[in-house]
Amino acid sequence: MHIDLSGKTSLVTGSTAGIGHAIAKGLAATGANVVVNGRSQGKVDEAVAAVKKSAKGGTITGVAADVSTAEGCAALVKAQPDVDILINNTGIFEPKGFFDIPDEDWQRFFDVNVMSGVRLSRAYMPAMLKRNWGRIVFIASESALMIPKEMIHYGMTKTAQLSISRGLAELTRGTAVTVNAVMPGPTMSEGVKTFVADLARQNGQSEAEAAANFVKQHRPGSLIQRFATVEEIANMVVYVSSKEAAVTNGAALRAEGGLVQTIA
Ligand code: NAD
């Protein structure tokens, strides 16, 4: 299978680092035009330069905007009024016991992880339906199904993304637009590297030992028994964004190393 998305324009939120950055590179390698997004202009410029190295003829541009606010989303849509492929990737996580999570954190997690995708889908999806082609992908998490007891607020946002994604797919009936969610498991992104480095420091271990122990202790159900690479997650996202994935719609696709034990 050869995925060719030349002529299509994609936007990946939160793509200056981590999974989003790998998705931006993966889409660039299919010939798609890619719009990179992050909060700071400097990081966006750096990311655009890095993604350009993977480009296969598409244009690579960037917009600095904070997608956790209504104003930030509006500024992003103003700068890039139309896209064929929207990847709602931006997301934050932080382990914190339920009894220590204040209202502000619940609201912040909801704004960053959920409302960013709601606002951008509301802005971009009508033109996709009108054109009769489009892809929206929400980067959820296996934590949508296996709510982590150390960050219930994060789990809540990821379950919400599955709900919104499935609901939006219902609006695509009879068109060639699809809306899906991808659920990564533990993945060695920039954010997770910092988290693992902290664990290593706290426990007097090397980072490799801390990563291996984390999977063994906290994700014992993982069949791959390791963190995924960001490229391994991007592969699934690029596929579901492709023309070849035309009949996958309304799905919550797993890229979680077999952590979730149920079959369906
Ligand atoms: P990361 O922290 O490595 O990168 C996040 C990116 O988003 C960065 O580029 C950051 O600058 C950007 N960003 C953060 N807040 C933003 C905002 N308000 N506006 C614009 N950009 C913003 O994160 P990651 O680990 O790659 O996670 C990406 C997505 O994947 C998230 O939705 C996360 O929940 C999901 N996910 C990650 C893992 C994992 O183990 N890494 C597992 C499952 C799901």
Image: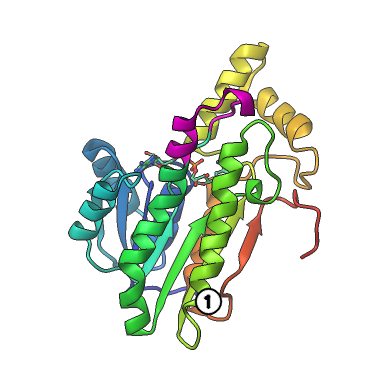
Residue 106 in the magenta stretch? The answer is yes
Question: Residue at the spot x=26%, y=45% of the render?
Answer: 65
Q: What secondary structure is marked by label 1?
A: helix
- Number of residues whose C-alpha sits closer than 10 Å to that of mark 1, classed few (under 14), some (14–19) or many (20 or more): some
* Magenta stretch in the rendered image: 94-109
Extreme residue in the front direction: 103
Viewer-nearest residue: 94 or 182: 94
Question: Residue at the spot x=63%, y=41% of the render?
Answer: 186
Quarter of the image for residue 131 reads: bottom left
Question: Residue at the spot x=48%, y=63% of the render?
Answer: 137
Residue 153 rendering spot, x and y as whole percentages: 57, 38
Residue 7 rendering spot, x and y as whole percentages: 30, 75
Viewer-nearest residue: 47 or 38: 38
Residue 9 appears anywhere in the view: no
Question: How was the colour assigned to the protein in this rendering?
Answer: rainbow
Residue 147 in the magenta stretch? The answer is no
* Residue at the spot of label 1: 170
Quarter of the image for residue 160 reads: bottom right
Q: Is residue 108 above or below residue 200?
A: below
Residue type (three-letter) at the residue carrying disc 1: Glu
Viewer-nearest residue: 106 or 87: 106
Apparent side of residue 107 relative to residue 220 in the rendered image (left or right): left
Question: Residue at the spot x=42%, y=47% of the render?
Answer: 90
Residue 255 rendering spot, x and y as whole percentages: 64, 55
Residue 191 appears anywhere in the view: yes
